[in-house]
Amino acid sequence: DAKTTQPPSMDCAEGRAANLPCNHSTISGNEYVYWYRQIHSQGPQYIIHGLKNNETNEMASLIITEDRKSSTLILPHATLRDTAVYYCIVRPGSSNTGKLIFGQGTTLQVKP
Amino acid sequence: EAQVTQNPRYLITVTGKKLTVTCSQNMNHEYMSWYRQDPGLGLRQIYYSMNVEVTDKGDVPEGYKVSRKEKRNFPLILESPSPNQTSLYFCASRTQGGGNQPQHFGDGTRLSIL
């Protein structure tokens, strides 16, 4: 599975957009980009995923560069409850083990 | 409500006393998996199951057993727990359809082995 690089921490003001970057320069053609978050030792929560195209759901937007070597997760209006560790994960869509490799992630602190 | 349920949420026990952590999902998912999370090591996969009666080892299977007799349940068994199995455990599930479907995680079980 491709390795990802994320900044260890970021701050964001409440109500502003939070833009979390992820570098995955060695991504393969069949690998998807997934984003999960973990709030204070709770179970990881799925946010969004994509292959090539930008994606949007009720939680966030995912912007993937044309060369697919990096992506950005956008939380459009961050709230205090969005304070969490955010993980960017790349893996094949048809992985036999289904294993998710969680790196160190980005700790997002949303401040009032 | 679609969910993955783990029990117990917290357990303190002693070395060598067999224990089972249950995991149940109500989404009719084929795939289920167990992870452990330790400081500085992230989440590591222990075992996974592609469907009923089909299980396989993950990255850190030593000291653990699993079974998958029913689609909804995937218990994690520690036959003779040791202190190095003190950890935060998560169960996850997903549908096999499409292969790229996201995994849904339980709320975790914090085990302390004294």
Image: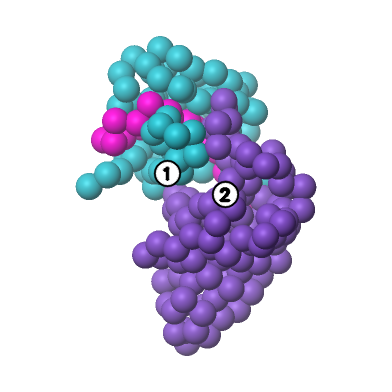
Chain colours: A purple, B cyan
Magenta-drawn segment: B22-40
**Residue, disc 1:** B105
The answer to whether residue A88 is left or right of residue B11 is right
Mark 2 in CB contact with mark 1 (< 8 angstroms): no
**Residue, disc 2:** A51
Q: Residue B32: tell me if it is visible.
A: yes
- Choose between B108 and B68: the one closer to the eye: B68
Q: Residues within 10 Å of mark 2 (few under 14, many from 20)?
A: some
Q: Position of residue A30 (x, y in %)?
A: 63, 39
- Say the numbered circle drawn on residue B6: none
Q: Which residue is rendered at x = 45% and y = 14% of the image?
A: B54
Q: Position of residue B1 (x, y in %)?
A: 22, 47
Q: Amino acid at mark 1?
A: Phe
The answer to whether residue A29 is left or right of residue A32 is right
Q: Is residue A12 above or below residue B96?
A: below
Q: Position of residue A81 (x, y in %)?
A: 42, 71
